[in-house]
Amino acid sequence: MSFTFTTRLPLSRHAIDRDHLSRGVPGLFDQLWADAATRVLPVWHGKILLAPKDHTGAVHLALLSPTSLPMSAQNPSLRVYLGRSLSTDLPEAFGTQIVAVQLDDAAAVGLESDSTRWVGLRTVATVLDDRDAGLFTEALGVLNWHASHAHCPRCGAATVVEEGGWVRRCPVDNSQVFPRTDPAVIVLITDADDRILLGSNAMWENNRYSLLAGFVEPGEALESAVIREMFEESGLRVTDPAYVGSQPWPFPASVMCGFTARLADDQPAHDLLPDGAEILALRWFSRQELQDAGEWMLLPGPSSIAHAMIERWLGAPLPAATELIRP
């Protein structure tokens, strides 16, 4: 399978060895904190700091030494070992070990009191290099998991963080809980005239449109989820689901599995039936209609897989009015 499409997706890029073998090293964080070469990625409410731009104007994550953290963050309650840098053209040497640290409000203010300097992943995903985009995505995904899995799902006991931040263990029965990712399908549907179907979600402004998407249910194949979700959201029967690529979407814990599908031969294209709960409006677009709609319609932003999938079909950049709205 070719990964050409996947390499275009901002959050699917990476240049990091996750180095899973080191996660179980006894006293891992003590060793890392004692190593002057270790670098720390501070995270606060899902946001990070950027380093000052270098002479090339490139944008990079602010990776700090452990000793440069505020005193309240010197021994943080939550650290995650992200792995080793594989980049050879960055200030950090090849093989540099990197740790994400979850900061509380006091530590974040002590590090940088100007809240506008803390930026979210969707804001900077397209301007970061492969390593930093992968680091930010990895850190956000696992920290979001920690935020929702602080207690044992069996007995409710507070769990203990182990394995470099990649396992939570119940102290009552020693059962382990591992990071979870929720798979979702996102689908570019075409009809016999090669138009695409876009929908407007109930949570958006009425001029925001994107591809239809939905979560995969337990015991369900991805292709089956495509057919079921598209029918549930649009009332249309689709066929021939074909996988095109995937992108992590840690908002809070998804991986978006991109598919194309076509309208079933015996399904009239005009039989649109928005579910009325999630999807309020549906509309078919030709390539020209989509380009003309750029003056009034908001489309998926450049960090999303939907953006890349629509551009792939369109064969041109999306209209300038695009905004961040959906995976």
Image: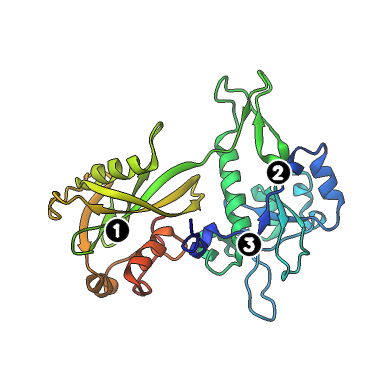
First reached walking from the N terminus: tag 1 or tag 2: 2
- Residue 245: x and y in percent read 45, 55
Q: Which amino acid lies under the numbered mark 3 shown in the image of this protein? A: Asp
Q: In the picture provided, is 92 more to the left or to the right than 105?
A: right
Q: For the C terminus, which image quadrant?
A: bottom left
Query: How is the protein colored in the picture?
Result: rainbow
Query: Tag 1's secondary structure?
Result: loop
Which circle's residue, 3 or 2, is located before the other in the chain? 2
The residue that mark 3 highlights is 132
Q: Position of residue 214 (x, y in %)?
A: 35, 45
Circle 1 sits on which residue? Answer: 205
Which is nearer the N-term, disc 1 or disc 3?
3
Question: Which percent across, then down, holds residue 156?
Answer: 57, 22
**Closer to the camera, 308 or 80?**
308
Q: Disc 3 versus disc 2: distance between alpha carbons?
A: 19 Å
Residue reaching furthest to the bottom: 55
Which is more foreground, mark 1 or mark 2?
A: 2
Q: Residue at x 82, y 55 (%)?
A: 67
How many numbered tags mark residues here? 3
Three-letter code, disc 2: His
| Badge 2 element | helix
- The relative height of residue 13 versus residue 160 in the rendered view (above or below) is below
Instruction: Give SS at disc 3.
Output: helix
162 up-or-down from 295: above or below: above
